[in-house]
Amino acid sequence: MSSCSLPRADWAATRAGAVLTVDLGAIVDNYRQLVQRTAGAVCAAVVKADAYGLGAAHVAPALQKAGAKEFFVAHVDEGLALRPSLSSHARITVLHGARPDALAECVESGLRPVLNSMEQIAQLRALAERKGKALDAVLQLDTGMSRFGLSASDVHQLFENPALLRGISLSLIMSHLACADTPENPANAQQLERLKQYAALLPPAPLSLAASSGIFLGAAYHQDLVRPGAALYGVAPNASGPNPLKQVVRLQARVLQTRTLSKGDRVGYGLTWQAEGPCRVATLATGYADGFARQGASTGCAWFKGEKLPILGRISMDSMTVDVSAIPEAELAADALVDLLNAQYGVDDVAAAEGTIGYEVLTSLGRRYHRVYQNHA
Ligand SMILES: *Cc1c(COP(=O)(O)O)cnc(C)c1O
């Protein structure tokens, strides 16, 4: 059983090497901000990948309490796992649709499949025929990203032969933007235009295009339903200006040991870092197995009471070493907790140090942190 390797929920945080605190109140505040920005559209919540690593079983019910009625996951099995956490009124949509042998269970469990291909359409049509009733589905159109959805020629086929959709009740037509985080990119308007053109050839249904960054492109992109994920969890929607969203996670790592180094002493695997003078270092109980990418070592840092603690040398599997010379020894010794993520230094800052994006930092967060859920409604 995989749960054997996870920290037990009833163990005290004080015994943990690292503590991940998820602020459910901040997620709800971010949701409410997005609802306000998209007035007139339905604001769904994307909770795939276990709510971007933060725990869908905690996050989705909190969002439901805040008014969310539409939830998106990627896989059927994610939807099945989520279903018991939500009321029967909540709708769960499966972005990848269902493999043929999972389609009946998908539909019977109240999960709405996205149809990304003519094959998936044919499979649902056949199931509807067998069941003798119309089945609810979303149609995804490829408007330029070449990742998921029907091509222009597929759309024309459906236009010329509407019977291909017999037994399928289209409750949404969606597409996905490739460049929404760069508002000046002309691909955005092009994709919006294509979505409208293609949809005009299909049975009437509400439209959806924007995920988190798309919401910030303006009202034209909101259409009937928006699908934010990352913004709920505090990731900046684009690179311009301050992040309007609240940080959601705090990650604290325990100091396991401290030591004083002399000029010329070296640190970590490969002895890649060398002290230029006397300094004090601390070893923290978090490493790359906990989601801190090794390439973050050269520019990454931890924080203690507003003071920056640069990472020294390579990050190990279960630990990393930081420079704590700036902190008086009496204040920071073994057993202290330092921050690796907090309200001032968030997932996008760690991402910048690691050469990646906030999405990847979140979804990489390790499974062995002691997790605390804060500010339930
Ligand atoms: C992941 C995903 C979303 C959510 O994207 P964010 O950028 O995290 O808001 C929305 N729609 C689709 C199709 C997705 O795959």
Image (cartoon, helix red, strand yellow):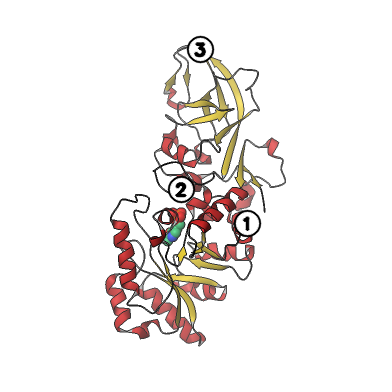
Label 1 Cα neighbours within 10 Å, binned few <14 / some 14-19 / many ≥20:
many
Answer above or below: position of 296 versus 37.
above
Q: Which residue is mark 2?
A: 359
Viewer-proximal residue among 1 and 364: 364
The amino acid sitting under disc 3 is Pro
Q: Residue 368: which quarter of the image? A: top right
Q: Is mark 2 within 8 Å of ligand 1?
A: yes
Q: Earlier in the sequence, mark 1 or mark 2?
A: 1
- What x and y, as percent, mark residue 139? 40, 72
- Assign a secondary structure to mark 2: helix
- Mark sitting on residue 62: 1
At x 53%, y 53%, the residue is 33
| N-terminal-most mark, 1 or 3 | 1
Asked whether residue 232 is in view, the answer is yes
What whole-number distance in Å separates the C-alpha atoms at marks 1 and 2? 21 Å
The answer to whether residue 99 is left or right of residue 56 is left
Report the disc number at residue 278: 3
* Amino acid type of the residue that numbered disc 1 sits on in the rendered structure: Ala
Element type at mark 1: helix
Point out the tag, 3 or 2, that comes first from the N-terminus. Answer: 3
Judge whether 103 appears above or below 372 on screen. Answer: below
Question: In this rendering, does residue 145 appear at all?
Answer: no
Dot 2 amino acid type: Tyr
Q: Quadrant of ligand 1?
A: bottom left
Where does residue 316 sit, x and y in percent of width and height? 50, 32
